[in-house]
Amino acid sequence: MMSNRYCTNCGAPIVEGTRFCGKCGQPLQSLPAGGAQPAPPQPAVQRRTAPPTPSEQILGIVAVGKPKGLLGMRQDSYNMIVTPTRLVFATVSPALMKEAAKRAREEAKQQGKGFLGQWGAQLAWLDVLHRQYRKMTVDAILAHYGGSFAIPNHQVQKVRYKQNYDQESGKSSDELILRTVDGKLRFKLLTGNLRQVKQLLRQSLGGVA
């Protein structure tokens, strides 16, 4: 007849009245008064955990302007951050431009550059922002810069590139047109050229770019 006792050596149930374990031969101690011997502890189950998600890689960054207002004379400025899974448009406000330009001047001053060198450095305020982005996760960028938004790659249906020429000024501008499931979005390229941007977007979007 089995009892509610278990061998402390192998965990096998003990037949009542025996002095040795019928499985491993371990001598059995007498059951202490006051209750039954508890079942031996079960080995801990090793749970397989999923590997941590790698940080979202930034493939490249392009400054763009989104026309707004009457005839598109004004524009909202963004940095288009290209990743393997989405296009992130980080808002660049006038205050942020001013802050980045100030930081660029301070960095130039620390490097021993004179007034002209500091003035020229502030024109590289975009580089200051780009370095800041690369220290953050993409989700943190979206949360930190109000008005930013993202477009998942699977929602982009087609990308068009257009070069506009103004005969009066003699200047040309490059335009990026994204056709998404929600409609078209037009952006003026503020940095880079059409060939460079096309190569960058193809890394992320493939054939639709």
Image (cartoon, rainbow, N blue to C red):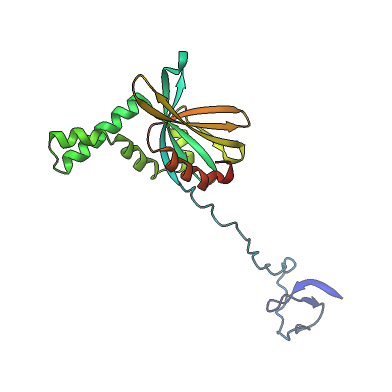
Q: Nearer the viewer, residue 203 or 44?
A: 203
Considering every residue shown, the one lying at the far right of the view is 1
Residue 79 in the image: state x and y as whole percent: 42, 34
Q: Residue at x 84, y 74 (%)?
A: 2
Residue 103 seen by the camera: yes
Q: Quadrant of the N terminus?
A: bottom right
Considering every residue shown, the one lying at the far top of the view is 70
* Vertical side of 138 occupied by 190: above or below: above
Residue 61 in the image: state x and y as whole percent: 42, 40
Q: Residue at x 38, y 28 (%)?
A: 172
Q: Residue at x 19, y 40 (%)?
A: 108
Would residue 24 appear left or right of 133 to someone viewing this image? right
Considering every residue shown, the one lying at the far front of the view is 167
Q: Nearer the viewer, residue 173 or 71?
A: 173
Place residue 157 in its image quadrant. Answer: top right
Residue 199 in the image: state x and y as whole percent: 47, 45
Q: Residue at x 39, y 45 (%)?
A: 134
Residue 197 in the image: state x and y as whole percent: 45, 40
Total residue callouts = 0
Would residue 127 appear left or right of 55 to someone viewing this image? left
* Vertical side of 196 occupied by 178: above or below: above
Q: Nearer the viewer, residue 10 or 112?
A: 112
Place residue 81 in its image quadrant. Answer: top left
Place residue 47 in its image quadrant. Answer: bottom right
* Vertical side of 44 occupied by 11: above or below: below
Would residue 23 appear left or right of 74 to someone viewing this image? right
Q: Quadrant of the C terminus?
A: top right
Residue 69 seen by the camera: no
